[in-house]
Amino acid sequence: MGRSSQDRPVRTRRARRRVAVVAGAVASASLIAACGGATAGTNSSGSGGSSSSGTITLYSGQHPELTTAIVSAFQKQTGIHVKVRSDDGIVLADQILQEGSHSPADVYLTENSPELMLLTQHHLLAPLPSSITSQIPAAYNSPTNNWVGISVRVSALAYDPALVSAGQLPASILDLAKPQWKGKVAIAPTDSDFVPLVGAVISAYGQQAALNWLNGLKSNAKTYADIESVDAAVNKGQQEVGIINQYYWYRLRTELGAGNTKSKVYYFPNHNVGGLENISGAAVVASSKNKSAAEKFVSFLVSAQAEKILAAGDTYEYPVRTGIAPNSALMPLSQVNPAIMSVVSLGNDLPAASLLQQAGLT
């Protein structure tokens, strides 16, 4: 089901934490690099990991509803108990960076590939067997087999057709920094789903162009604590457009009903980077004391059963396993024509976090 009003205060408090966490991730990663990288844990006893062969700890940055449904099905099928810690993906990645070889996490599940790339670069994720990675097309997986794709979403605009017509919408995400959009744009620069979009602009256009774009957004846009608030503001007619991921709009429509949804969703044309395809993925944490059970859980995540759970729910993400159809409410990806960027080109969140700080948006 869509995110309830009771969930939103918690989400908003987390959004405020991201300002410090994104900056903290830069410091944490720099410290780890200076110290020669984190050391992967072994199977010897220690403070981290799960002591019981029948229990694993999952750090999940995915939607709680989806996580609960998949965990429940996995536990029923395997008898392995999953302890879940839910937070934003950036928050949990930073936590693993700080915990290093003492992390209690066995599996990390997040909505954006840059966090997975950051942890891979610091040797905090274990290699996955081909029996897992081969279940998903290679384009959605780690190039070094340290994580595997679960689903994708697409960056987009929510817009109010009473304030702006479809023909007036920008062809490029960079256009929103132009003077004609002053006072008409809503953004959530500290939301963990906004940071990869900044990284994509850096990759596509370069650091200086990305900084110019962020400076233009700072001048033009009203900022919100999270993308749910951006989506709601556009639907209420408070802003003409808002930068979102498409699933936020679908979830709001499910919550409000089609009759109360005044906004529409717009996909950037011609594979513009504003329509970035974002990969959600999962990994076994290198310090896990129960890698066998952890691998079973990741294998379940990419199974047809779990991908069908994802497709049938109200998360409105696209499953990436071949042959699994997405939620019927979604426009087919072939019609969305997203900007597809390799996970290596998109990189980690650190350059994006640095530019957000320079622009005064965090």
Image (cartoon, rainbow, N blue to C red):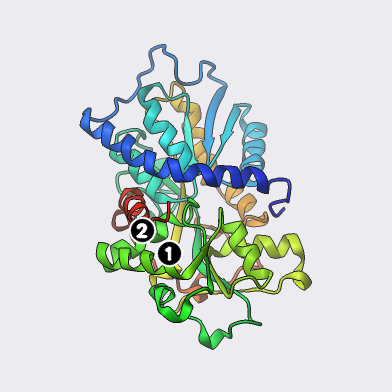
Vertical order, 159 against 347 (above or below): below
**Label 2–label 1 contact, CB within 8 A:** yes
Q: Position of residue 58 (x, y in %)?
A: 53, 32
Q: Amino acid at mark 1?
A: Lys
Viewer-closest of 117 and 195: 195
The residue under the point 56% across, 65% down is 246
Q: Secondary structure at mark 2?
A: loop
Q: Earlier in the sequence, mark 2 or mark 1?
A: 1
Residue 359's tag is 2
Q: Is residue 179 visible?
A: yes
What residue does disc 1 label?
Answer: 218
The residue under the point 33% across, 41% down is 26
Q: Position of residue 37 (x, y in %)?
A: 25, 30
Vertical order, 260 against 169 (above or below): above
Viewer-closest of 254 and 168: 168
Residue 268 located left or right of residue 41: right
Q: Is residue 325 visible?
A: no
Q: Secondary structure at mark 1?
A: helix
Q: Outermost residue toward the top?
A: 45
Label 2 to label 1, Cα distance in Å? 7 Å
* Crowd band around label 2 with a 10 angstrom C-alpha radius: few (<14), some (14–19), many (20+): some
Vertical order, 270 against 136 (above or below): below
The residue under the point 29% across, 54% down is 344
Q: Position of residue 137 (x, y in %)?
A: 41, 56
Vertical order, 3 against 331 (above or below): above
* Crowd band around label 1 with a 10 angstrom C-alpha radius: few (<14), some (14–19), many (20+): many
Viewer-closest of 354 and 334: 354
Q: Report which quarter residue 62 is drawn in.
A: top right
Q: Amino acid at mark 2?
A: Ala
